[in-house]
Amino acid sequence: MAFRKAVKGTALIGGGAIATVFGLSQFSQYRNKHGAFVHVQAAEAVAVPIKKDFPTREQQILTLRNTSEFDVLIIGGGATGCGCALDAVTRGLKTALLERDDFSSGTSSRSTKLIHGGVRYLQKAIMKLDIEEYRMVKEALEERANLLEIAPHLSAPLPIMLPVYKWWQLPYYWFGIKLYDMVAGSQCLKSSYVLSKSRALELFPMLRKDELVGAIVYYDGQHNDARMNLAIALTAARYGAATANYTEVLRLLKSTEPGSGRQRVCGVRCRDVLTGQEFDVKAKCVINATGPFTDSVRKMDDEEVPNICQPSAGVHIVMPGYYSPDNMGLLDPATSDGRVIFFLPWEKMTIAGTTDSPTDVTSHPIPTEEDINFILNEVRNYLSVDVEVRRGDVLAAWSGIRPLVTDPSSKDTQSISRNHVVSISDSGLITIAGGKWTTYRAMAQDAIDAAVQTHNLKAGSSKTIGLQLQGAEDWSPTLYIRLVQDYGLESEVAQHLASTYGDKAYEVAKIAQVTGKRWPIVGKRLVSEFPYIEAEVVYGVKEYARTAVDMISRRTRLAFLNVQAAEEALPRIVDIMGKELNWSEQKKKEELEAAKKFLYYEMGYKVKSDQLTDSSEISLMPSDIERYKKRFHMFDKDKKGFITILDVQRVLESISVQIAEKTLHEILNEVDLNKNGQVELNEFLQLMSAIQKGHVSGSRLAVLMKTAEENLRQRGVISVDRSGGGL
């Protein structure tokens, strides 16, 4: 009864206000302009023919070197830079793009994976009566609808629950979420709704029950950010843009303008990072779309120019999928320090984040233990006491740098909006900065509009609304069934290929290796618990992947899902890439080490080793110590004080279990803290103490020894599958 009264009161309080906002928002300008009609319209509007396939990287480098002058040259291969390339080339402009690392190697691959207007930005717009903030939210919601239409294989609507723990919050949040729906207008994905406490717990059983009043569910979009970025880049390449990753801009080229005598930017001096060769690329217009590195490129143009970008670090963590329902996210609208935390299902795992703190610009941001623990503590506040939120369940962690546009003197990044700006220097360098992932297309349109106007380029209006991206044309939700039926792929693998490559999944399936098994017929997995297959490595090289890091982080998303699984897959990935790219043994060794370093520092592997070291404290009850000593001595029969592979093999043979020697080496090495080739009693007790604290999970040695102890009594079977590989 109380719940019904609250909902009725909510409707009365919010109804008049919503009607007023609805009248003011001019939604009639933004009627539904998507769907099949728009796709046809967009394709017909582009006069430039699209190629069946994209050129090789080597061909792209030749085009860059041999073209006398481009109309537009974009620096930066993130979402905005690639969006600029696609916008420019589809207007008929001769277009080039240079990226010093890989496409989406920076901020664009390290997002929250949401395509959204920004609920908190709308809140600020209403509270502060900020019309600019309001327009940004409206624009983002339009772009959300467009992005879901042009890449349906890489994106989908996601319901997000906002749990309510105080009665007065129900009308407050309901009003705000309904405004969000109303601003979206006809492009609202699905109307938000209120849930009772029982229904909320039914849909999100992990939720904390105490004092829960009910919940509100609204819809936003979710996507595979790195693959989306790559799809934009590949689409631009198919339309004729000369795009090249691993091509670093060393300096800007300038020429003197006849008559005025002014210095004008006319191109760049760049270096092919893979070969070391340097060359010039000339262009009528140069666009700086380098995200957090915006100011470094601006200072190439003018060393005295003031900064316009204030970077902010956002850390995310990935946890096992059982922490959230398969198709329901969670929003914490007010954390302990005023931030917003999302808790979202993604790729069958759970993403939690993000933090928001000032940072220095770096190509290699590192997640800190402090940020990881902050997120974990906030997650604990919303999950049931029955769910133990363990530090050891963090499978991956990363930090991304948001390129927020702000006054250089401002220190409070939390109050900064992600509005974008287009600035034009005296020498003609165009900079597009700020913004957010969702609005990349609108940002690109504004940048190219500025380029056309400033440099008198012959081009029409933008053609990218409704323009389908790589893989979208013949994709359908049932495409994966054809892959299973026609090629003999596992259903999980087929679904993954369809949702990653769209209609290009057939090309991957065609090169998939025969397994030699009855089923699946083709498709050898890189690691057992993820649907990535070896054929994707071969195809990834075609998609311009040139390092092992490219493959584990952006062509596949292994590094973002489970760093231990990524490390396990690395040797095979390096072997396949080495064959495709003719790497020497020395080069393969270097790639392996570089990828491990990337996992260790940038993807949270370092914090795994910090949880269990040779100086870790042993905090066990005396009874637990005795119990674990007995377990240890079942393997250490000779009372040496340590166990080796031979000790483990002896126990396993006694219960008729065989494990490959290489696997046993790996299992012991996980716990061999001083790396002397054996596991000592103290190391084992340190492991068990860390497990009890929740700092470590998924230890194969701990599972093996516990199961062996039980099986020595019962003569059963030991299972030592990796249980998640938590950090």
Image (cartoon, helix red, strand yellow):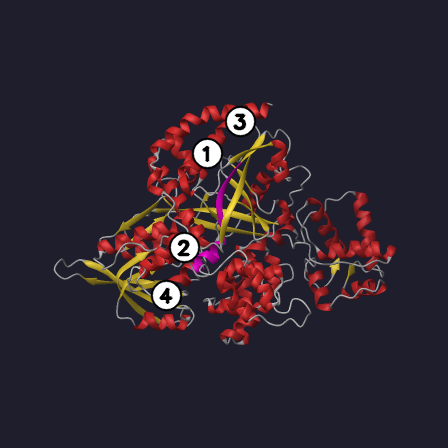
Quick check: marks 1 and 4 in contact, CB under 8 Å?
no
Indicate the position of residue 233 as horizontal and vertical percent values. 40, 61
Magenta region: which residues?
217-231
Quarter of the image where one finds residue 639: bottom right
For label 3, the SS is helix
Q: Secondary structure at mark 2?
A: helix
Going from N to C along the chain, the mark reached first, 2 or 1, is 2
Q: Which residue is mark 3?
A: 7
Q: CA distance from mark 3 to mark 4?
A: 53 Å
Name the kind of residue labelled 1 in the image: Lys
The numbered disc on residue 79 is: 2
Residue 213 versus residue 266: which sits nearer the camera?
213
Q: Which residue is depicted at the point 61% across and 59% down? A: 492
Find out whether residue 283 is within the magenta segment.
no
- The location of residue 528, given as percent across then percent down, is 65, 62
Element marked by disc 1: helix
- Going by the numbered disc 2, the residue's amino acid type is Ala
Instruction: Indicate whether 203 appears above or below 38.
Output: above
- Mark closest to the chain's N terminus, 1 or 4: 4
SS state under label 4: loop
Please report whichever mark, 3 or 2, sits nearer to the chain's N-terminal start: 3
Q: Amino acid at mark 4?
A: Ile
Residue 22 location, quadrant: top left
For mark 3, does the 10 Å Cα neighbourhood hold few (<14), some (14 to 19), or many (20 or more) residues? Answer: some
Q: Is residue 596 left or right of residue 186?
A: right
